[in-house]
Amino acid sequence: MNINDPLIHPLKIIYREAIEQNHWVFAEWFPNYEQDVLNYRKQASAKSWTDNELQRLIKNTSGNGISDLQQKNFEWDEYEQIKDNWFKIQDTFQVIVNNNTITINEYKTIFDFFRSFTNQNRYAATNRVVAAHLPNVVTTTVTQINIRYIITCIQKMCPDYPSSINWLTDNLNFIQYCNQHITFDHPWHSSVFAWYLKIYFEKKEEEKKEKTKAMVSYVNLLKANKNLVLTGAPGTGKTYLAKQLAISLLFNKIEESDLTDDEKKIFEKHFSFVQFHPSYDYTDFVEGLRAENLNGQVIFNLHNGVFKDFCKKAIAKTVVNNFDEEYDNFINDILENDFAFETPKHKKKFKVEINSNNTCVAIPSTNKGTRLSITKEILREYVLNDNIKDWKPYVTSLGNYFRENYTIEVKDSDNQSLPFIFVIDEINRGEISKIFGELFFSIDPGYRGEAGKVKTQYTNIQSNDTIFDYNLGQGWFYVPKNVYIICTMNDIDRSVESMDFAMRRRFAWKEIKSIDQIQMWNGQIDLWKDDAKKRMVSLNSKIEEIQGLGPSYHIGPSYFLALKNYNGNFEELWINHLEGILQEYLRGLPNISETLVELNNAYNLIAVL
């Protein structure tokens, strides 16, 4: 089960995994808890207590089957007074046991009874006695601080979970909520499930701390160098790590699921991902001519590539929240109405049509009737920045109409104070010099900003939105100081050799080993991750022993995520995912069949003498 599966309640997933893992809370503690609670309830119902059982219930620090207490427990002199006066409260315990429920007034009666014999409030000790009588009503988590901690953690996964109020109400709500969403193997599991959740959440927090500690070193390396290549064997989680690194750099968090809704919107604007391949080139990455259909005619217009557009966002001094929405309204209004426009100075009439690309086409009222294409980007530049080059009279007229009739929400941008992260997956699969061109110079960490500006290949035909920085003018481009580049690369790909030294020296390099990224299994293959780790380590150790292979040929943890498709069947994983890739590794080496058997033995943890 996947903890992020929207179709299954997360608490149900956590419980089922605990049962399948035979966790000690349910396998070892619960049988004792069940026996002790049955005994306590029997004596309470009969109002007949032995001294030994009463002492176990109230005074013993440990071994009473419910919860261990140290400093918060009753003192011996307090216990003696409680025991001597136990007859005064026995009726109340008999009622709550027979009804298998408890009211606020009944709880207050019990609390006041104990408080009358103590020199301070003994909340936890009192709650422990109550919990011993009410399985599947209250939990064995007897301190308010612990139950509040559990509730806080649950609310992060389950927004509908009720807020913390007091120990009794919190316990009643917990049992009720869990029973609504979980079918427990034993009804009384609900009472010990809270304590299991405490253990579970604390473990997750510890894992997150360890992950954060590891992430700090990656973040510092990226901050210091601006450009970073994550290299290693296939399946080591480099792409997964690159996105985590971007999140950590922006928000000091690691998982996308930890982001707030506002942070997710920021991340969407400040993060971009592209995968290189042999056909990828300068036109895709920086800028280039692209064919467009204009009223049946093919024309070529200059467009920004994905990296240039991304860098342009990084230097924007203002941000507009709703231009796209208002532009759509503008287009719809023109389609539905026969507007008459005229140029501002010479008052020349022209009409506007909308083509299939939702672009305005201005048609002057002349014999020739030349069709003038005014793109969304051209209009945006005028409306927002007063920048205009082509078709000035017509753009001005349309732009002024847009400004007068549509409301644009513009605010100062914090872009230049926040990092922008651009991820290039499998950078070595592209022809680097063809893609980057003159940007080799600009991406150098020492030449970021205007100091590293270069003229791009299509300088002479740039206009409007294809001009990178209007303060510098036509043709100039640079990589902003707040742009960070993360690349991934598989060590064993033959295309690695295409990475020339000029490019290599502009990046810091970090090898990602198989064992470094096994945290990607958390919440994905929890039931099998211990076995998966042993098998992966054993298999990779054997791979290193094979002449011609080595650490670059390790099997990474990503492969093992497929276990969830086979319900933890490691043989299926071998047949469908691992055997084929290992055969490719061994191609051209001697004794392939025998070596593959040895690798399979290592994978299955079979010791060969």
Image (cartoon, grey):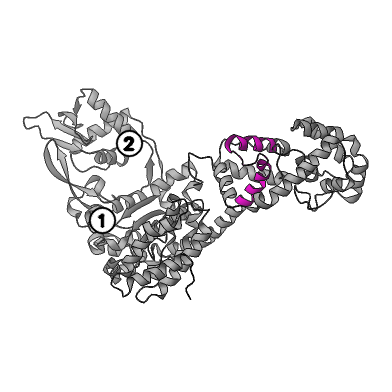
Secondary structure under badge 1?
Answer: strand
Q: Residues within 10 Å of mark 2 (few under 14, many from 20)?
A: few
- The disc label shown at residue 476, or none: 1
Percent position of residue 445, x then y: 37, 64
Residue under pointer 2 = 324
Relative image position of residue 538 (x, y in whole percent): 47, 68
Give the Cα separation between the discs numbered 1 and 2: 27 Å
482 is higher (above) or lower (below) than 132: below
Q: Is residue 276 visible?
A: yes
Query: Taking 330 as reference, is 25 left or right?
Result: right
* Observer able to see residue 215: no
Q: Magenta segment range?
A: 171-200
Residue 182: say if magenta.
Answer: yes
Measuring from the top left, give residue 207's x and y in whole percent. Answer: 56, 57
Q: Amino acid at mark 1?
A: Trp
Q: How many marks?
A: 2
Image depth: mark 1 or mark 2 in front = 2
Q: Main secondary structure of the magenta part?
A: helix
> Depth check: 142 or 250 in front?
142
Indicate the quadrant where residue 451 lies: bottom left
Q: Residue 376, labelled with which disc?
A: none
- The residue shown at (37%, 72%) is 595
